């Protein structure tokens, strides 16, 4: 049996880091009602959020209604946008 290569170890480390980033992002994802409130307080449309994240406007609508949650692919971008909007509308205080 051959030993795992450095490349294999690096890949496992990247996958683990990606998983942990997704877990942290999901833990910081506001409730659906708060997601909508943050967006509305900033005067931003669902379409604008959707374009930034790379999804359809109806997807953002579903995220805000609680009908679905962002996939790992979109989760980090969406939480970062919400965080930035919240910071901008609250003067940096959360």
Image (tube, rainbow, N blue to C red):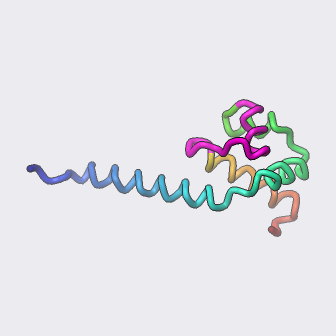
Q: Quadrant of residue 67?
A: top right
Q: Is residue 64 magenta?
A: yes
Boundaries of the magenta span: 56-74
| Residue at left offset 78%, top offset 45% | 64
**Count of picture labels:** 0
Residue at x 24% of width, y 53% of height:
6
In the rendered image, the residue lying farthest to the front is: 67
Residue 22: % across, % down:
55, 54
Q: Say if residue 28 shows up in the picture.
A: yes
Residue 23, given in percent of the width and then of the height, sits at 55, 58
Residue 50 image point, x, y percent:
74, 36
Can you see residue 51? Answer: no
Residue name at image x 86 percent, y 64 percent: 91
Spot occupied by residue 28 in the image (x, y as percentages of width and height)? 67, 61
| Residue 81 magenta | no
- Viewer-side residue, 42 vs 61: 61
Which quarter of the rendering shows the C terminus? bottom right
Query: Quick one: which residue is furthest to the bottom in this view?
Result: 93
The image shows residue 28, relative to residue 35, as above or below, that is below
Magenta highlight: main SS: helix
Instruction: Name, please, the residue furthest toward the left.
Output: 1
Q: Residue at x 91, y 46 (%)?
A: 43
Is residue 71 rendered to the left or right of residue 9? right
């Amino acid at each position: 049996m051959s030993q795992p290569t450095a490349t294999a170890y690096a890949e496992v480390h990247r996958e683990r880091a990606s998983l942990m980033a997704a877990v942290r992002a999901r833990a910081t994802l506001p409730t659906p009602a708060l997601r909508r409130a943050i967006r509305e307080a900033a005067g931003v449309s669902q379409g604008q959020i959707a374009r930034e994240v790379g999804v359809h406007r109806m997807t953002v609508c579903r995220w805000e209604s609680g009908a679905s949650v962002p996939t790992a692919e979109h989760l980090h971008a969406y939480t970062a946008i919400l965080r930035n909007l919240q910071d901008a509308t609250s003067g940096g205080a959360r």
